[in-house]
Amino acid sequence: LRDGLARADLRLGDLLLQMSASFGVTGFDQLEPGDVGVVDGMIAAADTCLYRSKAAGRNRVIGKRLWPFGSTFVVEPGA
């Protein structure tokens, strides 16, 4: 998605605009019915990752896996 946005030709009249996007993502191995607290935690973690991604610069993805390992990953521009 990030790469596709960067490659898209977006024209406004004679002006060619360039886009970049930063994302915050999170994941969980398995959800059970009624895991509303887990879902709320995932949304909060993705939001935190989004702000970290924006603070690190343009065109980045930062994510956090919530369970069971809790590892953080970063996708740099061009990756």
Image (cartoon, rainbow, N blue to C red):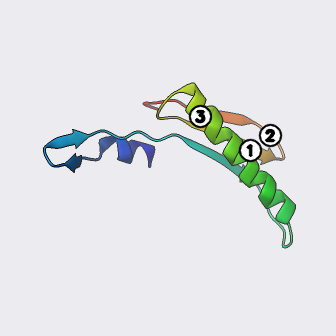
Residue 28 is at least partly visible in this image: no
N-terminal of the pair, mark 1 or mark 2, is 1
x, y percent for residue 75? 55, 34
Q: Residue at x 21, y 41 (%)?
A: 16
Residue at the farthest front position: 13
Amino acid carrying mark 3 in the image? Ser
Which residue position holds label 3? 53
The Cα–Cα distance between marks 2 and 3, rounded to whole angstroms, is 17 Å
The Cα–Cα distance between marks 1 and 3, rounded to whole angstroms, is 15 Å
Amino acid carrying mark 1 in the image? Arg
x, y percent for residue 71? 75, 36
What number is the disc on residue 42? none
Amino acid carrying mark 2 in the image? Gly
Q: Residue at x 72, y 53 (%)?
A: 43
Element type at mark 1: strand
Say left or right for 59 vs 5.
Answer: right
Compared with residue 72, is residue 44 higher up or lower down, i.e. above or below? below
x, y percent for residue 63? 66, 41
Q: Residue at x 52, y 40 (%)?
A: 22
What number is the disc on residue 70? 2
Which residue position holds label 1? 65
What is the crowding at mark 3: few (fewer than 14 residues within 10 Å), some, or many (at least 20)?
many
Element type at mark 3: helix
Compared with residue 10, is residue 18 higher up or lower down, i.e. above or below? above
Q: Are marks 1 and 2 in contact (CB under 8 Å)?
A: yes
What is the crowding at mark 2: few (fewer than 14 residues within 10 Å), some, or many (at least 20)?
few
N-terminal of the pair, mark 1 or mark 3, is 3
N-terminal of the pair, mark 2 or mark 3, is 3
Which of these two is toward me, 38 or 68?
38
